[in-house]
Image (cartoon, coloured by chain):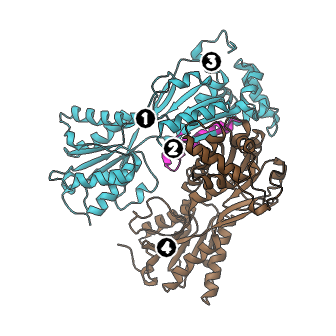
Chain colours: A cyan, B brown
Amino acid sequence: MPETFPNTPEAARPTMIDVARRAGVGLGTVSRVVNGGHGVRDETAQRVRAAIDQLGFQRNEVARALRPGKKSSSLALVLGDLTNPFYATIAKASLEVAGQSGFAVVLGSVDEDPEGEKRAIRELVSRQVAGLMIVPDQGDHAFLAGAGVPVVFVDRPATGIEADIVMVDNEGGGRLATEHLLSQGHERIAILLAPSYYTTGRRLRGFRRAHRTAGLDVDESLVVQLPEGNAESAEKATRELMLRPDPPTAIFASTNFLTEGVLRALGELGREPAVVGFDDFRLADMLPTPVTVVASDIAELGRSAARLLLDRAAGTDRRPPQRIVLPCALIQRGSGERPPSAAKRKAR
Amino acid sequence: MPETFPNTPEAARPTMIDVARRAGVGLGTVSRVVNGGHGVRDETAQRVRAAIDQLGFQRNEVARALRPGKKSSSLALVLGDLTNPFYATIAKASLEVAGQSGFAVVLGSVDEDPEGEKRAIRELVSRQVAGLMIVPDQGDHAFLAGAGVPVVFVDRPATGIEADIVMVDNEGGGRLATEHLLSQGHERIAILLAPSYYTTGRRLRGFRRAHRTAGLDVDESLVVQLPEGNAESAEKATRELMLRPDPPTAIFASTNFLTEGVLRALGELGREPAVVGFDDFRLADMLPTPVTVVASDIAELGRSAARLLLDRAAGTDRRPPQRIVLPCALIQRGSGERPPSAAKRKAR
């Protein structure tokens, strides 16, 4: 890779985003200017060119990185089931950012299947994409080291390779949800976990930490590892939990689909323990009891990943692997604010 | 394009799907066999080869069409907002079918913006994809005639070009929804329509036809053309409708987002007219009054489009442009079964 900024320290090296920012325009406009300036007003184009010069960019390097139509002007995105709004939101956001820079996105959607994931990645790499965004499955990703293109992991780190990762504060979110329930007097809180993904492990860690801080022991029989990460699995587990002689008074559902399953079971049983879900979802506020969730900006996950990858692909960001962590916030809507006594009474 | 089946009439020309069917395997297996047979049992591979021979395929033509890693082994998919489950479902399904044949999918997601759509298509075509699947926006698509690759339109036809189209029976669905409401004694039925897309026009036609068949006039003041196709727009319109001195006793919401907006407004107002939505959506059955919808198999829309496009790209389907129409069905859940008298009373 050519050293284009010999006098600039690694961390301060300007990116295309810096050009856009300094010129007060979007990345798409920067792209149009370096590709000939069609559809950009003269005055704006001049401002962009000035910003490029001021920041010390080689103009044709930017052009090369941003020019559409070349086979290397595609990014690949490998992620799970697109009908899960979580993945769809990441896909949409990263497509938008890539598109603004003239990059297309080749999509590989694999439904939590390590072999399928590996195959999809190999196929995409063989298409000579400029970079890879991956929501990694479990398993070793050392094979990616030979891919010859930059990789950004989204939502979860991968083992076997050092690369950029953009994720949410899973442990902090897990603690936030649990502290909220504890603060309302709940002492028997169940947590439902999808099969051992990195994220749910971290959420469980936050759950434990909140208990420890409150001086409470976790009842291990309330830590439920589900065989599958779908709503049906959570529904079944919730039914079993609530029919025990000593049911929990609150449930922390560690993904959006699990929350749905918990609510289905409670609706059938007519029971109302407190419920907090991880990740917001459409219509959460319209359910019979609006759902309290711990949420983060999922679209920003996709945007940050795409921005970082574009800068890596263009060679304008050569820092060591970065770790970007987005915060979580609690959205109180009702289901998480029920007192422990509510779990015993029947729903209306 | 080479004439590989000189003695086969157009309509009877076998496709790769026929090979898969005759061999009793998936398209992915066919792909693996013609690409070397890795990971396929000898017996299965033999069956696939026999099917190819029996159907009169040139084996290397199939191989060329199915071989992964070539730049022409990508399909492009251009559609709207991926966070709309309707589009996400189409994307997921077409990715699955394409992937089974070793094809990647390059995605362009444009949010109901004709200029953005045109730009996205041009960019994708310049990447030399083997074919295009497009959920077309309004406006002339004649520019596609020069794209040099097969095009399949999904959900809506486009003007200016003759091409394959896979869609749902919008008019039939509109009639079904309206007949259901009429059969329960509703005579003042409002219909909410997103900006003049082809699909909503057809749904309106079905609405009118059902009225005509029942010998009723449509009250044109109850035909509401919304300025935007989002939930907020439908929410506002519903509030206005219900606060009229002569409100409707039933509402037909012609898209999933519009249905959401209608329900939000009714929840706030505490009114309970009958509601039928077009297209099913996640959690529709968990809302305070479960939602009756007219629905079709959206995933099949994506699958059919991808299958057709693969056959066109491989040259194994050379029929004139096809029009595939999927049926709609009514799913009764409660909101569509309220009698006219319910509209007057306040909700619990």
Q: Chain of mark 4?
A: B
- State which tag comes first along the sequence, 3 or 1: 3
Q: Chain of mark 3?
A: A
Q: Quadrant of the N terminus of chain A?
A: top right
In percent of width and height, residue A320 lies at: 53, 17
Which of B283/A304 is in front?
B283
2 or 3: mark nearer the eye: 2
Q: Is residue B100 visible?
A: no
Q: Quadrant of residue A60?
A: top right
Q: Which mark is residue A87?
A: 2
Please name the amino acid that badge 3 sits on.
Arg
Q: Mark 4 falls on what kind of element?
A: strand
4 or 1: mark nearer the eye: 4
User: Is B212 drawn above or below residue B324 in the view shown?
Assistant: below
- State which tag comes first along the sequence, 1 or 2: 2
Please name the amino acid that badge 4 sits on.
Val
Region in magenta: A79-105
1 or 2: mark nearer the eye: 2
Same chain? Circles 4 and 1: no
Q: Which mark is residue A327?
A: 1
Q: Is residue B132 visible?
A: yes
Same chain? Circles 2 and 3: yes
Q: Where is mark 3, residue-wise?
A: A13
Q: Which mark is residue B275?
A: 4
- C-alpha span from label 1 to label 2: 18 Å
In percent of width and height, residue A44 lies at: 77, 34
Image-based side of A22 in relation to A249, left or right = right
Please name the amino acid that badge 2 sits on.
Tyr
